[in-house]
Image (tube, grey):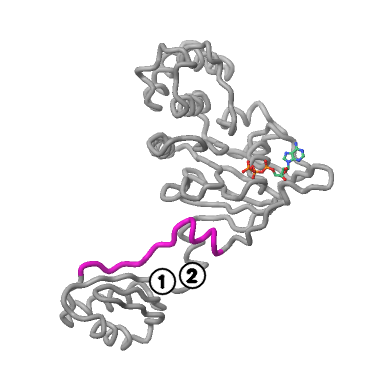
Amino acid sequence: MIRLEKLRKEYDDLVAVDDIDVAIPEGEIYGLIGPNGAGKTTTIRMACGLLEPTGGKVSIAGVDVHQQPERAQENVGYLSDFFSVYEDLKVWEYLDYFAHAYRMPASDIPARIDEVIQQVGLEVKRDVLIKGLSRGMKQRLGIARAVIHRPKVLLLDEPASGLDPKARYDLRTLLQSLRDQGTTVLISSHILTELEGFCTSIGLMETGRMVRSGRIDEISSAESQLRVVRLSWLGDSAAAIETRLHANPKVSGLMAKEREAVFRFGGSEDELASLLKELVQGGVRMVSFGEVKQTVEDLYLKLSKNEVM
Ligand code: ATP
């Protein structure tokens, strides 16, 4: 749905974006991660057609953003990191203005405004002046504006910055609901925890380069051939469990204390299930047993060289 090919941006002798290749399939929530100055904003601005690349190309839903800008815009919703709103308009008037700017059929506009207002949870603020909205509400209004014309792709540059935890939670829920309706979302952040738990794929940028891009589960398993497993139990001492685990050749790096342990496992899921069965049948009163999934933060720390330009 979003395709960046050898995308490049130079500012004099600074390479802000260095020949990056990214393919984001339909229905993904793609988190673009990287420290300040990595090139995220430059990439997003090129992706939505606002900034001319020095080289390479961008296509959204198969349409070249720079060759066919008007057609491409039908499929793109964009919200910049510092967007301005017309403070003296009412919420519905603001959306009405953008709906007309996107040349939506006039007869569809009132119903569509009510629909997006409901989607972003601003029903009670429909007739309120924008200057009376909180920062989180303005952010949601910005997203409503970006999706008013039902784009297939939503590009959001640091949308969570400055939001309190509740507003961030609401933003996640909103993005997940947009994704459930088929929108492909690209969201940037330099704060990993903002993207944790709801992005389905990530791209890690540093000094203009794409260090790694893909689905989180695929990157995780490529980075770690070994699963990390954590377990806890009742009764038996750690020493007794350690003896049983050490007997399995796929277990390594075991650390056990009192009634819990963590170890690396070099076998398949099937073999892990057999190990659990063996322990339980051997009399271990298991309370929990499971693979520790790598977080976006774990991956970032593994992959990042911490380079900043
Ligand atoms: P942040 O998280 O701070 O927003 P970013 O990852 O979005 O950072 P960019 O804003 O894309 O980074 O900037 C990438 C690099 O390009 C930086 O070194 C920046 O200084 C440089 N840059 C960006 N815009 C321009 C410009 N108009 N002229 C010259 N250099 C620029």
Neighbour class for label 1 at 10 Å: few (<14), some, many (≥20)? many
Q: Is residue 218 visible?
A: yes
Residue at the image point whose x is 63% and y is 34% from the top: 48
Which residue matches tag 1?
227
**Disc number at residue 93?**
none
Residue 68's place in the image compared with 131, above or below, is below
Circle 1 — which element? strand
**Residues tagged 2 and 1 counted as in contact (Cβ below 8 A):** yes
Foreground: 295 or 154? 295
Q: Seen in the image, is 107 located left or right of residue 239?
A: right
On the image, the x and y values in percent for residue 268 come to 38, 74
Q: CA distance from mark 2 to mark 1?
A: 7 Å
For the N terminus, which image quadrant? Answer: top right
Q: Is residue 108 magenta?
A: no
Q: In front here: 268 or 199?
A: 199
Label 2, secondary structure: give it.
loop
Horizontal relation, residue 260 to residue 179: left or right: left
Q: Which residue is mark 2?
A: 224
Lateral position of residue 234 relative to residue 128, left or right: left
**Image location (x, y in percent) of residue 153:** 53, 36
Q: Amino acid at mark 2?
A: Ser
Q: Residue at x 35, y 73 (%)?
A: 262
- Mark 2 is surrounded, within 10 Å at the Cα level, by few (under 14), some (14 to 19) or many (20 or more) other residues, namely few
Q: Residue at x 48, y 61 (%)?
A: 298
Q: Quadrant of residue 238?
A: bottom left
| Residue reaching furthest to the right | 12
Name the amino acid, label 1.
Arg
